[in-house]
Amino acid sequence: MTRISHDNFFEVMKDKINILFITTDQQQKKTLGVYGNKQIRTPHLDNLANKGIVLDRAYCENPICIPSRNTMITGRKSFHHGAPQHNSSLPDSESCLGDVLKREGYDTHFIGKPHFKSQQTRGTEESIADWREGLYDDWNGPYAGFETVDIVLGHSNPLTGHYGQWMKKNHRDKIELFFEQNLSSADVNCGQGVYRTEIPEEVHSSTYVGNRTVDFIRKSAESGEPFYCFSSFPDPHWPLMTPPAFYDLYRNTSVKTEYNSFAHDPNLKNYPEVMKEYLVSGVFPDYDGGGHRVKDEKDIEIITRAYWGSVSLIDKNVGRILKTLEETGLQENTLVVFTTDHGEYMGAHGMMAKGGVCWEEYINVPFIASLPGSIPMGVRSSSLFSFTDIVPTLLEITGIKASDGLPPLPCDGVSQKDLLTGDKDRIRKSLTVHHARANMRTHVPDQHVLICDDGWKLVYYAGDQGGQLYNLNKDPGETKNLYNLSEYSVVQKSMEKELLDRLILESDLDPVIQRMTADPTWGAHVLKGWD
């Protein structure tokens, strides 16, 4: 396959590159064959990786669903886009990638789990209570920059959202299979729900997202309009309710359950207080997500098998989506991105689920991108990539530039188009991650993470005497905390200063760009405070 050179890259862009952005929810990077898992079956995602680039050091900006997903569509850090915690919601004033692409003639469509706003708060487009009362029966957008939406709410929930409407119309007799009395709970003492079910594959939410994405691609092929499609699988997030064939897929697979608990770290005294409290209580209620201790090693094996089954079902549907791109002739002109909103401990460090500590399993996520002729095939990169880079990268790949002195969007990240196309090996020297405490908890600090290109990682807890410092090159499992050790004081002080400098500079990135409703001069946005 001939690769498009840097010089004629934007000549090709005249035809407008389609964007297919595929996400999952709470997927650990090690659940893909391309990331070294020799036991799991993910042939279609592995094949996508072989046709494009695999990033080994991609990091979510804030490892909770709502803040992370809003960074994906705004390019802004969570304390800028206004939804930094689990039950927060993206302000309606915030401009998104879809707003810009709509202005450029793109058909913008969302499928699956959005989680751009709280599902527990009345008055949002994702309010489960409002959906159950029929307030959104005739609604399908616009929403968060997408002109049309086809959404799934909750996890494997067939009673709300457009998925629920479809189930009630076409498979009402299957809905009771999702009810608690018809679920067989797995024999585990940790996690947030693992069930053997009789839910048929054809009505599962992963299949629904796959079907709807296939339908949209076929419609786009007929219309000839360029598209930006965000296809979001609700799994493998808890509760795990995998169809029988996929629940049993790894029944005879031996799962490694060994882990290193930080309780055995000789530098335990220099960890932050909240982690020491966790060793006593076994849970992290102070951070959204509910990360907690594994009580029995057998639980890891049982849960992992169900989790892997869920991932393999997603992979099957991704395969169907990619095949449709090929069959419709859209593959050559479509940028495909696959990632997840954040990771999952799945037994690492003796922990399960998410929330609590910014271990690599939680914040370092899978990221694969493919665009035939532009992104080289079979490439792997260890360069740093932040979720704040997603929007500016997509904007540059689609050829959308600043106009009238205004950027298309006020992104906090940088474009990494040159990294994806192979024109540069490195763009970032460092990045930051922000893990906010739970909404109603105030006695613990937010976590601010600095990750450097040379392998050093700092997790800073403001107001606490303890913290975390690792050399990931020498200690990728994060088993030896070097924080407050005298022999690493120079490195620690240097990283703390860089983190402080970055937070100060990032917090001052005003003005905020808001959605435009009155003056067409500025298209999708104007600067707040301008006359």
Image (cartoon, grey):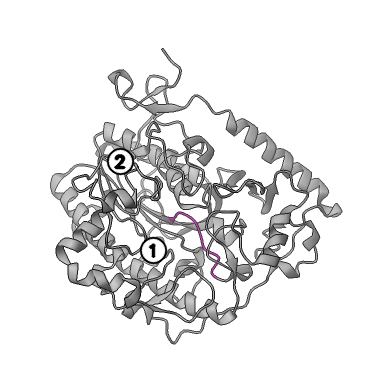
The circle on residue 154 is: none
- Residue drawn at (58%, 54%) of the image: 287
Residue 63 placement (x, y as % from top left): 52, 52
Judging by the rendered image, the residue that carries numbered circle 1 is: 235
Q: Quadrant of the N terminus?
A: bottom left
Amino acid identity at mark 1: Asp
- Is 289 colored magenta in this rendering? no
Judging by the rendered image, the residue that carries numbered circle 2 is: 143
Q: Which span of residues is magenta-colored?
A: 340-346
Among numbered discs 1 and 2, the one appearing first in the sequence? 2
- Residue drawn at (51%, 46%) of the image: 85
Pointer 1 local density, CA inside 10 Å: few below 14, some 14–19, many at least 20: many
Image position of 422 with respect to 350: above or below: above
Q: Assign a secondary structure to mark 1.
A: loop
Q: Is residue 289 visible?
A: yes
| Name of the residue lying farthest toward the right | 486
Magenta stretch, overall SS? loop
Image position of 430 with respect to 403: above or below: below
